[in-house]
């Protein structure tokens, strides 16, 4: 299975900083996922591959906390999925849900 991950930010990708939690940027999230979660997935599903889909929320924001996401951001996420649709069998929009779609 080939899974595409869209990382939006939020608590799941946050790390402790001197002033509290802050979300990792997309590169930091990918590194943490590859080091900590991917080995667990591949131990159970060795044929599973993961790809990262960059969705950037403007020139200064690679991530947004879900409390700050607006409808235009939902459209940005949907467009990124549509553009990558033929490359993946499933999508994970973090920190939201796993989506598996079939278009006929």
Image (cartoon, rainbow, N blue to C red):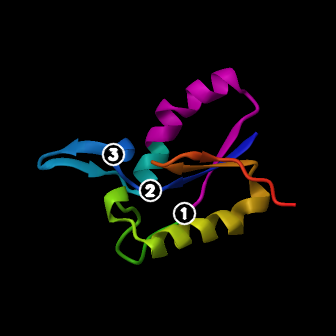
- The residue closer to the viewer here, 86 or 31, is 86
What label sits on residue 54 in the rendered view? 1
Quarter containing the N terminus: top right
Between the C-alphas of marks 2 and 1, the distance is 8 Å
What label sits on residue 11 in the rendered view? 3
Q: Which residue sits furthest left?
A: 19
In the rendered image, which residue does mark 2 sit on? 26
Where 69 falls versus 31 (above or below)? below
- Sequence-first tag of 2 and 3: 3
Between the C-alphas of marks 1 and 3, the distance is 18 Å
Quarter containing the C terminus: bottom right
- Mark 1 lies on a secondary structure that is loop
Q: Dot 2, crowdedness within 10 Å: few (<14), some or many (≥20)?
A: many
The answer to whether the residues at label 1 and label 3 have Cβ atoms under 8 Å apart is no
Residue at image coords 49%, 47%: 30
In this picture, which residue range is highlighted in magenta?
32-54
Q: Dot 1, crowdedness within 10 Å: few (<14), some or many (≥20)?
A: some
Q: Is residue 99 magenta?
A: no
Q: In the image, residue 99 lies at what x, y percent?
A: 64, 49
Q: Which of labels 1 and 3 is toward the front?
A: 3
Residue at image coords 57%, 27%: 39
Q: Is residue 35 left or right of residue 4?
A: left
- Sequence-first tag of 2 and 1: 2
């Amino acid at each position: 299975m080939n899974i595409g991950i869209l990382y939006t930010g939020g608590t799941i990708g946050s790390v402790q900083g001197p002033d509290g939690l802050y979300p990792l940027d997309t590169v930091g999230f990918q590194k943490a996922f590859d080091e900590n979660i991917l080995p667990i997935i591949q131990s159970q599903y060795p044929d599973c591959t993961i790809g990262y889909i960059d969705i950037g929320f403007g020139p200064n924001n690679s991530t947004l906390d879900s409390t700050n996401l607006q409808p235009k951001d939902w459209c940005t996420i949907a467009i990124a999925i549509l553009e990558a649709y033929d490359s993946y069998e499933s999508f994970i929009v973090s920190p939201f849900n796993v989506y598996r779609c079939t278009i006929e």
